[in-house]
Each structure stands twice: as C-alpha cells, then as structure tokens.
Image: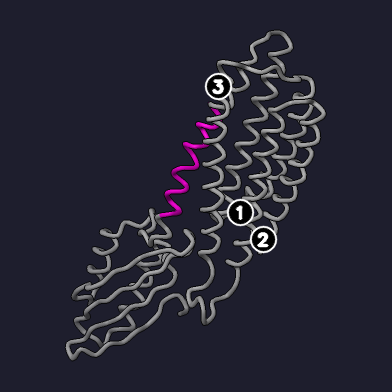
Amino acid sequence: MKSSKNMTIAFLLNFSFAILEFVFGLLFNSSAVLADAVHDTGDALAIGLSTFFEQISNKKEDGNYTLGYKRYSLLGALLTSVILIFGSIMVIIENVPKVFAPEKVNYDGMLVLGIVAIVVNLAASRVVSHGHSHNESILSLHFLEDILGWVAVILVSIVLRFTDWYFLDPLLSLLIAGFILSQALPKCWDNIKIFLDHVPSDVDLSRLYGEVLAVENVQAVTQLNVWTTDGLEKFAMIHICLENPALLAETQNTLRQELQAYGITKATIQTDESQEKHEECCLGGE
C-alpha cells in the first residue's frame, strides 16, 4: 500500500507541473517548454497507470488469481517503460533537425522554470526512491530523465546569456535521451523476461540443482522449476526421489534452508517413492 501512496503523490506532482509548463510555455512563447509539457503529461499518464496497477497488485489471491495479483505491478512497469522509451525516441526524432537549424529560446524564463522544475522532480524522485517495486524503480528513471533535462536547460540558458549557441539545447536533449534509452531498454527486457517466467537473474539454476541433488536422502531430481511473479517474490517446484521416504521431514527442512539461501520462500516439493506414491508438502508456511 505504501508503494501505491508514493506513486499517487508522484503522479500529482508530475501532472500539476505539466499544467504549469503548458501555461508558462505559452507565456514564454517557448516550443521547448511546450514540448517538455507534452513529455511530462506522458510521464503523468504513465505514473497514473502504474499507480492503478500497483493498487490492484496489492489484492490477495482469490478464485480468479490463485497466485495473487502481483504481476499487475509488473504490467504497470512494462507500460511505463514502453512510454519512456517511446518518449525518448520522439525527443531524438524531434531534436535531430534542430541541431542543424536551432531555434531561439527565452533563456531568462527557462532559467527560472528550470530551477522550479528540478525542485519538483527531486521531491517526486525522493518519494519513490525508497520503494522496492519494479514500478517505483522505473518511475525513478522518469524523474532522473526530467532532472537531467532541466539541468541541461539551465546550463544552456546560462551559456546563451553570453553566446548564440542555440544548437546546445537540442544537442543536450539528444544526449539525455540516449542515456535514458540505455537505461530503459534493459529494464524493459528484464520485465519481459519475468513475464515469460524466466529464471530470476540472481538464481543459478544449475548450481541450485546440484545442491538439491547433494542433499542427503535425495536420490534424484526429476523436476526443478524456479520463477518469480513480480521480480521480488520467488517460487519453486521440485520433484525428487528419496532413498528413504521415512526421512521426508528431515529432507524437507534441509531443502528449505537450501532454497531460502536463494531467496526462495515458497516452494512445493513432490516426492516419488518406489511404490509411485506421491506426497506434496510446502515450505515457508505453505
């Protein structure tokens, strides 16, 4: 619930400032400010979607979603990263021609607005910086993009007080957009892999397989599945053959320790005895 509250505050800050950008963009007759207002409106939309899905993800499992709703948080992160990538690409497309045909800007107004913008974005970034969800991680990248962008605007406004190097504005925008893409694309791909039930990146499956097989009383490992629903909570399903079925409880406790070392707190273990009798047990309170 704290994640949802954080993102609601971030949404209100971002959307409110986007409105101010539209107003001052018209007053300053600045296409750069208006373009950033459009960009921040897209950010606010992304944050709103993320907040909506984060609230859904906090719901408990039920008859429709027996594993819970946590993947809705991941869906929000995916949509946000796609919007961020699309916005960065649009910035690149828009500013490449401006490098060769730069436009004059109102650098006095940009300087003042830039200072205010950095304060707002720092406040929004601080709100989500202490969160651990994928949504809050990708939203922090949003605010990093905005802060870097406005720092560039302030630097350009100072330089333009003494020169007419108006090409610096679109040039810095291209550099920032390129940096954001280099960060957003890997995050987006990581989220896609989670959706596809890829083994968590911090779990060495072959090593885990060897450790499970090396547990006393484990004769064979016929199935080992490890996955995560939201990038935070890890699950496992193991099918093993025991040398002595009577020592099931002791073997279970040992396996629990092995799995918890990998951050796996919920697992289902299925044993296969010589008489083809199957039992199921759960770890981590399941």
Q: Residue at x 51, y 78 (%)?
A: 64
Of residues 15 and 100, the one drawn nearer to the viewer in this rendering? 100
Of residues 235 and 112, the one drawn nearer to the viewer in this rendering? 112
User: Closer to the observer: label 2 or label 3?
Assistant: 3
Q: In the figure, residue 283 lies in which quadrant?
A: bottom left
Of residues 282 and 59, the one drawn nearer to the viewer in this rendering? 59
Q: Secondary structure at mark 1?
A: loop
Q: Amino acid at mark 2?
A: Lys
Q: Secondary structure at mark 3?
A: helix
Q: In the figure, residue 193 lies in which quadrant?
A: bottom left
Counting from the top left corner in percent of width and height, residue 243 is at 19, 81
Q: Is 186 inside the magenta-drawn segment?
A: yes
Using the image, tell me which numbered label, if any, was put on residue 2.
2
User: Closer to the observer: label 1 or label 3?
Assistant: 3
Counting from the top left corner in percent of width and height, residue 92 is at 53, 30
- Mark 2 touching mark 3, by CB under 8 A? no
Q: Label 3 belongs to which residue? A: 97
Question: Image height check: is 75 above or below 219?
Answer: above
Does residue 266 appear left or right of residue 63 in this picture? Answer: left
Which residues, given as a range, are shown in magenta? 175-192
Q: Amino acid at mark 3?
A: Pro
Q: In the figure, residue 101 lies in which quadrant?
A: top right
Neighbor class of circle 2 (other Cα within 10 Å; few <14, some 14-19, many 20+) is few
* Dominant secondary structure of the residues highlighted in magenta in the image: helix
Does residue 106 appear left or right of residue 177 in this picture? Answer: right
Q: Label 1 belongs to which residue? A: 131
Q: Residue at x 63, y 41 (%)?
A: 143
- Mark 1 touching mark 2, by CB under 8 A? yes
Q: Residue at x 38, y 53 (%)?
A: 201
